Image (cartoon, rainbow, N blue to C red):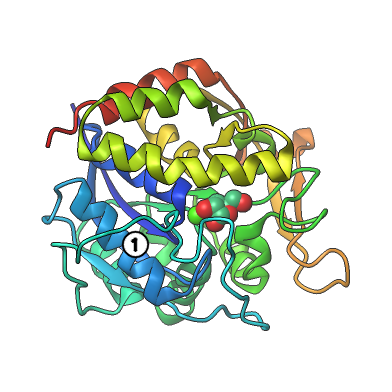
C-alpha cells in the first residue's frame, strides 16, 4: 500500500487528540511530524498536549514541534475552556516521554516539504500555515494537499457567523485560502454529521488499554460541554474528519468550491464564504459535504482498538 506522508498541524484539544490517535494508528499514513499552534489553549499547553498524545500512542519516532504562539490577527484569544483548562479534559498526566523537538514548527514544516511529497492536515487555527507561506514564498507549489478542519457554510460555533479555527486567526485563513494549492475543507456542516455517543465512550473504556481509558476520560467532559451547548452528549468529531478523508477518500462526499473569509466585520469576523456555484465544480479546492457516521465510528473503533499497552 502506498502510504501518504502527513504532517499534522494542531491545537490539542480533545477532538484533536482523537484525530491524532486515529492518524497514528492508521497504516495508510506516514505521520512525519506534529506541529502545535496557539488555539484552543495557549501554545505551551497545545505543545505539551501534542507530546502527551504522541507519547500515549507510543510513537516517540514522531517529532513534535511548537509553531506560532500568536495569531496574525489581533486580538490574541483567551484560552477556551471547551476542552478544559489544560486543553485535554484536565486529566492527570505524567511528564510525556516525547520531548519537544527544538526546531521551529514552521521551519520544520518547510523541512518536511523539502524531503518529499507532503499532505498537511490542519486542525487548528491556520497561523502556522500562513507564516509558512509568508516565510517561504512559493512553497505552496511543492505541497501535495492541505486538508483543513474549519469554516462553516451557514451557522458558526464560536459566533453565529464563524467557526473557531477560522475566527481565531481570520487573517491567516485568508492567506491560506488565497494561496494556489490543493485544499480540502471540512466545515462544521460536514463535521456535525460525525459524532460519538455514550456507547462509543463505553466501548473505548472497555478496551482495557491506556489509550481506551484516556480517550473515554477526555471525551467525558467534552460530552458534558456538548450537552450544555447543543442539548445532547453526542461528541462532534470535527478534527477526525480531516484525517478520515485521507484514510478513505470516497467516504466523504465533496464538491469543488471557491473559498473566501471575512477578516473584519463587527458580527462577521471569521465568517467563511463557500461558493458552491457550478463554475467551481472542477476546482482543486473542495469542501466536504456528506459523511456516513456509522462507517466513520466503526473505523475509529477498529483503529483505536489496535493500540496495546
Ligand atoms: O470548531 C471546531 C474546531 O475548533 C476544532 O478544531 C476544535 O479542536 C476547535 O479547535
Ligand atoms: Ca482543533
Q: Where is residue 129 in the image (x, y as percent from the top left)?
A: 46, 67
Residue 230: image quadrant is top right
Decide which of 77, 90 is in the foreground and name it.
Answer: 90
Query: What residue did someone put label 1 on?
Result: 49
Residue drawn 64% across the image and 61% down it = 166
Decide which of 80, 47 is in the foreground and name it.
Answer: 80
In the rendered image, the vertical position of residue 128 relative to residue 75, given as above or below: above
Residue 19: image quadrant is top left
Q: How crowded is mark 1: few (under 14 residues within 10 Å), some or many (20 or more)?
A: many
Residue drawn 57% across the image and 37% down it = 236
The residue at the far front in this view is 92
Describe residue 238's horizontal placement relative to residue 19 as left or right.
Answer: right
Decide which of 177, 39 is in the foreground and name it.
Answer: 39
Report if the beta carbon of the residue with label 1 is closer than 8 angstroms to ligand 2: no
In the rendered image, the vertical position of residue 66 relative to residue 298, given as above or below: below
Residue 298: image quadrant is top left
Describe residue 142's horizontal placement relative to residue 97 as left or right.
Answer: right
Residue drawn 25% across the image and 42% down it = 24
Amino acid at each position: 500500500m502506498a502510504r501518504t506522508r502527513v504532517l499534522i498541524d494542531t491545537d490539542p484539544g480533545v477532538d484533536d487528540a482523537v484525530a491524532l490517535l486515529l492518524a497514528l494508528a492508521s497504516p495508510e499514513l506516514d505521520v512525519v511530524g506534529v506541529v502545535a499552534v496557539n488555539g484552543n489553549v495557549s501554545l505551551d499547553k497545545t505543545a505539551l498536549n501534542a507530546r502527551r498524545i504522541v507519547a500515549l500512542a507510543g510513537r516517540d519516532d514522531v517529532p513534535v514541534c511548537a509553531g506560532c504562539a500568536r495569531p496574525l490577527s489581533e486580538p490574541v484569544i483567551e484560552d477556551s475552556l471547551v476542552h478544559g483548562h489544560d486543553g485535554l479534559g484536565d486529566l492527570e498526566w505524567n511528564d510525556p516521554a516525547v520531548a519537544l523537538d527544538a526546531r521551529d514548527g514552521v521551519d520544520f514544516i518547510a523541512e518536511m516539504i523539502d524531503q518529499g511529497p507532503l499532505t498537511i492536515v490542519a486542525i487548528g487555527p491556520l497561523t502556522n500555515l500562513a507564516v509558512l507561506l509568508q516565510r517561504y514564498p512559493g512553497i505552496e507549489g511543492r505541497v501535495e494537499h492541505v486538508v483543513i478542519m474549519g469554516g462553516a457554510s451557514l451557522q458558526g460555533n464560536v459566533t453565529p457567523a464563524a467557526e473557531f479555527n477560522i475566527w481565531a486567526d481570520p487573517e491567516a485563513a485568508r492567506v491560506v485560502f488565497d494561496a494556489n494549492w490543493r485544499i480540502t475543507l471540512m466545515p462544521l456542516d460536514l463535521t456535525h454529521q460525525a459524532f460519538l455517543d455514550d456507547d462509543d465512550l463505553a466501548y473505548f473504556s472497555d478496551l482495557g488499554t491506556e489509550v481506551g481509558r484516556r480517550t473515554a476520560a477526555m471525551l467525558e467532559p467534552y460530552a458534558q460541554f456538548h450537552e450544555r451547548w447543543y442539548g445532547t452528549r453526542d461528541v462532534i468529531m470535527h478534527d477526525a474528519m480531516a484525517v478520515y478523508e485521507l484514510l478513505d477518500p470516497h467516504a466523504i462526499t465533496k464538491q469543488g468550491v471557491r473559498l473566501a473569509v471575512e477578516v473584519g466585520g463587527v458580527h462577521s469576523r471569521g465568517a467563511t464564504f463557500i461558493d458552491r456555484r457550478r463554475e467551481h465544480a472542477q476546482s482543486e479546492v473542495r469542501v466536504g459535504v456528506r459523511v456516513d457516521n456509522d462507517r466513520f465510528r466503526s473505523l475509529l473503533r477498529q483503529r483505536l482498538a489496535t493500540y496495546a499497552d
